[in-house]
Image: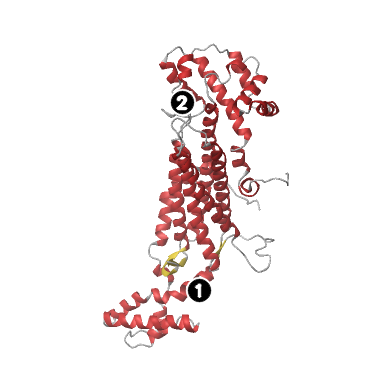
Amino acid sequence: MSNDRYVSPMSERYASKEMQYIFSPDMKFRTWRRLWIALAETEKELGLNITDEQIEELKAHKDDINYDVAKDREALVRHDVMSHVYAYGVQCPKAKGIIHLGATSCYVGDNTDIIVMTEALKLVKKKLINVIAELSKFAMKYKDLPTLAFTHFQPAQPTTVGKRATLWLMELKLDLEDLEYLIDTMKLLGSKGTTGTQASFLELFDGDYEKVKLVDSTIAKKMGYKECFPVSGQTYSRKVDTRVLNVLAGIAASAHKFSNDIRLLQHLKEIEEPFEKNQIGSSAMAYKRNPMRSERIASLANYVMVDALNPAITSSTQWFERTLDDSANKRVSIPEGFLAVDGILDLYLNVVDGLVVYPKVIEKRLMSELPFMATENIMMDAVKAGGDRQELHEKIRQLSMEAGKNVKESGLENNLLELIAADPAFNMSLDELKKTMDPSKYVGCAPMQTEEFITDVINPILSENKDILGMTAEINV
């Protein structure tokens, strides 16, 4: 590794080797050669004078790319595609005359971009499914554990730890739906020519439009796609890049929400992300256990959500059949967006896999607030014993304010139950009141909702994708 030049943190710190390879030069240029083979085969099948010997020669050298020859040639001609056409031709002297026949640079460039993004989306799906699987285990494990719920980060009616996890899961399910739709609808550019009219192919096939139409569909099948875009300029619509980054931004947003909740819960000492034996939380405060992983998720997610603006702006400013002010932006925004999401999902999986739950802390906080939550039940029991509902409501309100004042201003324990027991209007002893303090009575349908959601919604997804389950994730630094 050279230490005298900038290296992207996405590759050095955050993204997996698997995702890095998808956006590597090797993946790119091998795909170019696969596309040139598909084009030559298609043209041969449609009647052009291309031999089996030429095709076999191309196939024999599809992976052993002579990068040095291409690099030297590009320094001379300043054109990456033509440099690789030349380098391929050096290795394939019999076929060099038919390489790239009738195509433009966008034939290999744009089709490869689509193929690379599709493969990257499939890897994102694999990791997203594994996060969903791990989170579903957590939800089921803690579906019955009562915890204080919050609205506006103020104490609210209790829920369960597992039910809270289903809220994170639901957002990931929505992301998965968007992701699967996008993967299923990805199309190749095909070979459309300089302005999308396929004029060169109409010339090659002596005006036979039916054969020209077969060029795109045949190439698509050879490359493993259902179809090509029916119309385009020289490039595929950059709106595709916008759709892709928007789906990635959606995943990032869901992960960000999860990371925020974990950071807040870690502050409350109720749930912590994993903390390694030799991990240092602070250079100054040795006792600290900072939620570093969750903070990194939030940081990378911010990047991805903003990065989604890049293709949106680019696609909106393309001129007519094509312009080249998209190229430099695409080279950065799309790979970096995928690498960031890849890192986010590895972190997400790593955090969920190692979450530490502290039931005693959760119970203590819940019990400190539960008397306020139980006031409606207490009031109903007092009414059943002959009390006046309106009078009791006012007394409950006043006693709640007094107990709250004791907690906030004097730092005392919540003594609402004692205050109620001392008021003859309620006609209830302290022991009777304490019997109402079972947290499980106040979580509503949370346990059942959790179990039904996992069983009916999540498990079918996991069953359908069982062949890609079982991932673990290690973070780099």
Q: Name which of mark 2 and mark 1 comes first in the sequence.
A: 2
Q: Quadrant of the N terminus?
A: top right
Residue at the spot 42% in from the left edge and 85% down from the top edge = 418
Amino acid type, label 1: Lys
Q: Position of residue 62 (x, y in %)?
A: 62, 25
Q: Is residue 90 above or below residue 78?
A: above
Image quadrant in which you'd find residue 214 = top left
Secondary structure, mark 1, is helix
Q: Position of residue 26 (x, y in %)?
A: 63, 33
- Seen from the viewer's position, the closer of residues 331 and 405 is 331
Q: Position of residue 397 (x, y in %)?
A: 35, 80
Q: Where does label 1 land, which residue?
A: 364
The crowding category of the residue bearing disc 1, from other C-alpha atoms within 10 Å (few below 14, some 14 to 19, many at least 20), is some
Residue at the spot 64% in from the left edge and 22% down from the top edge = 86
Q: CA–CA distance between discs 2 and 1?
A: 69 Å
Amino acid type, label 2: Thr
Q: Is residue 193 above or below residue 205?
A: below
Residue 464, can we see it?
Answer: no
Q: Where does label 2 land, which residue?
A: 195
- Seen from the viewer's position, the closer of residues 251 and 443 is 251
